Image (cartoon, rainbow, N blue to C red):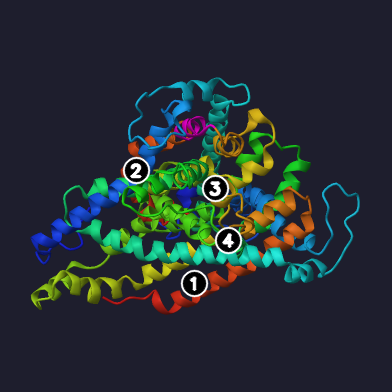
Amino acid sequence: MRSVNRNQVSTWSSRILLQIALIFLAVIVGFPLYWMLVVSITPPAEVFSWPLHFWPPHPSLENYIEVFTRQDLQLPRWFLNSLVVSVGATIATLFLSSLTAYGFARLEFPGRDTLFIILLFAIMVPGQVTLIPVFLLVRKLGWLDSYNALIWPVAANVFGVFLLRQFFMGVPKDLEEAAVIDGAGRFRIYWQIILPLSKAALIALGIFVFLATWNDLFWPLIVLNRLEMRTLTVGLTVLQGTYTQERGLVMAGAVVASAPVLLLYAIFQRRIVQGVMLTGMGGR
Amino acid sequence: MDNEMIMNAGRRDGPTPPRKQVGSWRTWRWTLGNYLFILPFMILFSIFVIGPILYAFYMSLHEWKVLARQHPFVGLENYRQLLKDDIWWIALRNSLYFAFLTSAVNTVFALFVAIGVSRPILGRDFYRFIFYAPVVLSVSAMGIIMSWMMNTQFGVINYFLIWFGLPPVKWLADTYLVVPSLSIATVWWGFGFPMLLYIAGLQGIPEHLYEAARIDGANSWRITWHITLPLMRPTIFFVAITQLIAHFQVFGQPLIMTNGGPGRASFTTIMYLYQTAWRFFRMGYGTTIAVGLAFVILFFTLLQFRLFGRQSVVEY
């Protein structure tokens, strides 16, 4: 990445000062993650001991074994639920919003601008307004405790349409014209020209839909009741509320839930950072 | 469809309809094909977004208990009740307090960090990596970590305080400290996001401005103060308002870390919505709370548009 201040103004002393400040901050920001790991490998008997140890004197995997084998915890199943729902929502969102964005960016049809204004209006209305009506609808459809309830409402992602439309409009038209000469139809232009050229935006959108769905709490909390249908985030919340005396166990659950997203982040770090800068998404 | 495309080769506007007289069967069929691109999404959108928005307003005008057979029309009674509802005002105050505190700290703090990691220093990418990492955690994992660290008796933060000879603090157990404590936890969790937005903004500042200032003999503090900050103003406004809107909708942190307590000291509007609709099953009043929330958020959004009308154009 290009540096902003490439000049020699910063003297050595201020540079060293900055370096020290950043190291200090990195330690503070990284410490809670380290601490999560430490507590999770502390044997249950030693969690409530004082003074604290920054590395447990008797590290053990007891909490992990416990968290995976307890009858009322179904961590592997919750993990699978989170995965199915997040992948499903991501694929559905990417396909539907890119298709729609292409329609709004390039195709002509009566009422196009009116429909787009309706989308604009909808994006102004905060999501909480629709929670109760969508919940009642999902219940009426018999979708409570199902993957459908967690995938389709998420796939109606207006923001994705906006983002991709904006991006598609920036794709030069010459390429499409060349394809038209070669006899390509609308769908083929969308599929073979627009989508490959918009890979950066699609990947960014995909990553953020995945993370947002994986980490969402409110919606799964209200549409999921059955133990085996919970997502990891919901399962963890219940774990935290139930096992207040077993911190190590709860912390092991947090590690298991966080490891995949942290791993994903480590692998796609560059993509994610670029994606945030490109789209302005990826936070809360 | 392919031969139609050949006929239109060279036209400016992407794939266009066949050049036949208007209203012919083929033109009509072409237009219909265009609709197919947006149809699947528009169906979902109607069912899960626009329909529910309209239905929410309808519901808020009714006494709507979930198991009741009848949902009698009550007009604006729900709204009247909302304005007189002490819990609503407590929750609103807590949410606003949390939102202002968190977004203020995030807006300023993330900016300084972003300026820091935009300098040509050793390990710059590593710092960015670490600072954004907590953002990818779920609110429940974050809440589990932070509530244990902030535990009064066994928390590691108090351990450090005692180690430095300071008195321990009742972070989440104190009526006055609970919202700032949630705020601290949230800043740790989320400041990496505005940091990246700022880094992107900083990259957009042309190099020649810095060079000019350097030739004029300005030091790095003066450059930051007189060039970077003024040029970053639109980004700063953007971050401040979007952070405000996002953190106003706080739910997971208090639910997991304090359950709204002690008392109602960290009870927020979204928690109230959750409780009303899914603990007491009062869907009509719940929707009224949601609409009330929406108006607060809408106010911030309009503020954002106003500010952007003036601030978004920067000339270099």
The amino acid type found where label 2 is placed reads Phe
Labels in figure, total: 4
Residue for badge 4: A123
Q: In the rendered view, would you say A265 is above or below A180?
A: above
Q: On the rendered structure, is A139 left or right of A11?
A: right
Q: Nearer the viewer, mark 3 or mark 1?
A: 3
Magenta extent: A246-255
Q: On the rendered structure, is B110 left or right of B272?
A: left
The amino acid type found where label 3 is placed reads Met
The CA distance from mark 2 to mark 1 is 35 Å
In the foreground, A158 or A178:
A158
The amino acid type found where label 4 is placed reads Ile
Residue depicted at 88% across the width and 63% down the height:
B73
Q: In the rendered view, would you say B198 is above or below B299?
A: above
Mark 2 and mark 4 lie on one chain; the one further toward the N terminus is 2
Mark 3 and mark 1 lie on one chain; the one further toward the N terminus is 3
In the foreground, A64 or B246:
A64
The amino acid type found where label 1 is placed reads Gln
- Could you tell me which chain the residue with mark 3 belongs to? B
Residue for badge 3: B257
The CA distance from mark 1 to mark 4 is 14 Å
Task: Residue A254: say if magenta.
Answer: yes
Residue for badge 1: B304
